[in-house]
Image (spheres, rainbow, N blue to C red):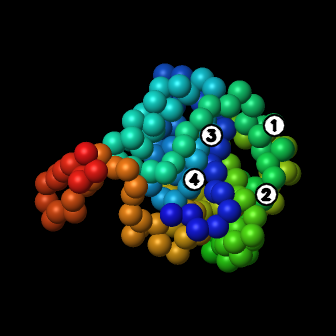
Amino acid sequence: MNDGPELAVVRLGHRPGRDERMTSHVGLTARALGADRVILPDNAGQSKATVKDITERFGGPFSVELSDSQKALIREWEGRVVHLTMYGERVQDVEEGIRETHREEPLLVVVGGEKVPFGIYEHADWNVGVTNQPHSEVAGLAVFLDRLFCGRELEREWEDADQRVIPTETGKKVEPTDSE
């Protein structure tokens, strides 16, 4: 999906037992809406397994990995950093500049979990608010990626999928692909 340099999403913080679903949904949203990979905290092994399973069944390419130091990863990132926060600049005011930059440089999107250290705000090239109201980090990531890719991610074709969802007016329909 991503036609430019790499776009990775990093999830800051993970509280086992409390954040499993949210961390998994950050990874699944990153995958579904155009990122190349997601980096999760090293204690989020169950979430990694969930995202990996979905990628194997519904296609990729997409990678998921664990890291014991998201802060170091952000500091050492060779590209630009977008931190999604409700305290940032309005997405509609900065999306075009981010899109232009991403045509040339890798982009790391930082999604918080627990309280985000102030150093992340300082290191980010953009602190971006999808809205300045309390909301889910998954919702913020989804809106940001959709605006970044101008909706093109919704038409994506998936490689190496074992199954696919068939759009229907009502009900659920999943069928095997021809690649099996």
Can you tell which of label 1 and label 4 is closer to the viewer? 4
Residue 34's x, y, as percent? 52, 59
Residue 153's x, y, as percent? 46, 66
User: Which label is found at residue 72?
Assistant: 1
Sequence-earlier tag: 2 or 4: 4
**Residue 150, relative to residue 37: is it above or below?**
below
User: Which label is found at residue 106?
Assistant: none
Q: Which residue is mark 4?
A: 36
Query: Which amino acid type is shown beneath numbered disc 3?
Result: Ile
Q: Is residue 163 left or right of residue 54?
A: left
**Image quadrant assignment for residue 65:** top right
Local crowd size for mark 1, using a 10 Å CA cut-off: few (<14), some (14–19), many (≥20): few
Q: Image point 73% across, 40% down: which residue?
A: 116
Q: Which residue is mark 2?
A: 79
Q: CA distance from mark 1 to mark 3?
A: 12 Å
Q: Image point 78% across, 44% down: which residue?
A: 74
Q: Residue 36: in sight, yes or no?
A: yes
Sequence-earlier tag: 1 or 4: 4
Q: Is residue 128 left or right of residue 151?
A: right
Q: CA distance from mark 1 to mark 4?
A: 20 Å
Query: Which amino acid type is shown beneath numbered disc 1?
Result: Ala
